[in-house]
Image (cartoon, rainbow, N blue to C red):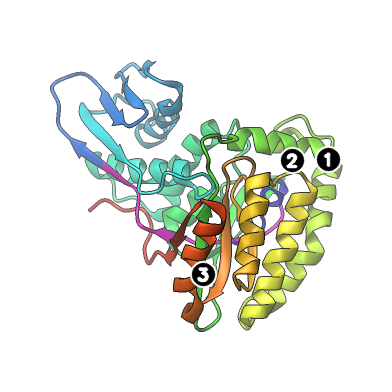
Amino acid sequence: MLFGEHYVVYGSPALSLPIEPRNAVEFSDWEGDGIALKSELGNASILPSGRYDGPDELEIFTAVVDAVFAGKAPPSLVAKFSPAWKLKGVGTSASLCAAFAAGLCRVAKKKATPEEIFAAAQSGDLVAHGGRASGIDAKTVSYGKPLVFQRSFSPPKFEGNLSAFALPAQTELLLIDTNAGKKDGTFKMLEIFASQFGINTTPGEAPEEKRTAVREEYAPLWEKISSAMKKASAIQLGALMDENHALLRRRKMSSAGIEKAVAAAHSEGACGAKLTGGGGEGGAVLALCQQKDSKKIAPRISEATGFDCYHLEVAQKGACAD
């Protein structure tokens, strides 16, 4: 997410980018019944009846199976999950759901469109985020393009339009992982954000006037982002990132670690910096840098904060079965 975290859940537009390296799910045959799931979080199984057995963290994939097979019994296979990213705030749950959906469609001999993969991935991501997933993560990883995403409620609709956005010339994004052993889950941060506006239900159940209040707070910033989308300089884009971060910090989405990373990025010469994703303890930070400086800035940020700092690459394709 480059712009619009949390506000997007209530219908504000947001800009997202697909990133490399890619998360992966490897499929193989087995002689048991249903689907065996294997990951660093543990092992689980989804039986032909739909019954799930395993750790809570993997249960989201039952929704993906239901979406792909529409109530029919799935074939027997093993799915091994290999996340390339092990940090918070980069859409990993949606990405793994999309990869899983793409592989299941291949197994089922379905030629799935990006929109069909999105629908299946979103079903799993909704479970992961307690019904509060906006859809932007699943849409972005399914299409593999920069997206301007907007959710509507009456009728429910997820609209993701391909964006011509590109980073300013000779700039690069750095991704800073502030995890120091403790992470606030995205669901928790979504609840905290909602509470700031007096919302204690899922977004779809919230009164429209409260959703409107969320959108109105963010609208002036989005107007600036929209006008600068195709022609922003590094200084302009960095300033917009800073402004978006200030909004999120005001709504208690930041943390001491995130603020430490943002401050370090600025002090080392970044053009702008902001939290990305859910935020909170252990969240991730994006920093916009000049390419000529990024190789020096990244290790200095790590030295100053003790956090890992990665050079970010924008992906060129969405979820697919190879």
Q: Residue at x 36, y 63 (%)?
A: 317
Give percent across and percent down for residue 113.
38, 54
Res 297 label: 3
Res 197 label: 1
Q: Is residue 17 above or below residue 191?
A: below
- Few, some or many C-alpha atoms within 10 Å of disc 3 (few <14, some 14-19, many ≥20)? many
Q: Earlier in the sequence, mark 1 or mark 3?
A: 1
Q: Residue at x 37, y 28 (%)?
A: 41
Give percent across and percent down for residue 301.
54, 61
Q: Is residue 210 left or right of residue 177?
A: right
At numbered mark 3, what does the secondary structure look like: helix, strand or loop? Answer: helix
Give percent across and percent down for residue 57.
45, 27
Give amino acid for label 3.
Ile
Q: Are marks 2 and 1 in contact (CB under 8 Å)?
A: yes
Give amino acid for label 1.
Phe
- Few, some or many C-alpha atoms within 10 Å of disc 1 (few <14, some 14-19, many ≥20)? few
Q: Residue at x 29, y 24 (%)?
A: 73
Q: Is residue 169 left or right of residue 42?
A: right
What's the magenta region?
Answer: 11-25
Residue 1: in sight, yes or no? no
At numbered mark 2, what does the secondary structure look like: helix, strand or loop? Answer: helix
User: What residue sits right under mark 2 in the picture?
Assistant: 193
Distance (Cα) linking label 2 and label 1 = 7 Å
Image quadrant in which you'd find residue 238 = bottom right
Work out whether residue 18 or residue 247 is closer to the camera in this orientation and state it.
247
Give amino acid for label 2.
Phe
Quadrant of the image for the N terminus? Answer: bottom right
Q: Is residue 316 left or right of residue 122?
A: left
At numbered mark 1, what does the secondary structure look like: helix, strand or loop? Answer: loop
Work out whether residue 141 or residue 289 is closer to the camera in this orientation and state it.
289
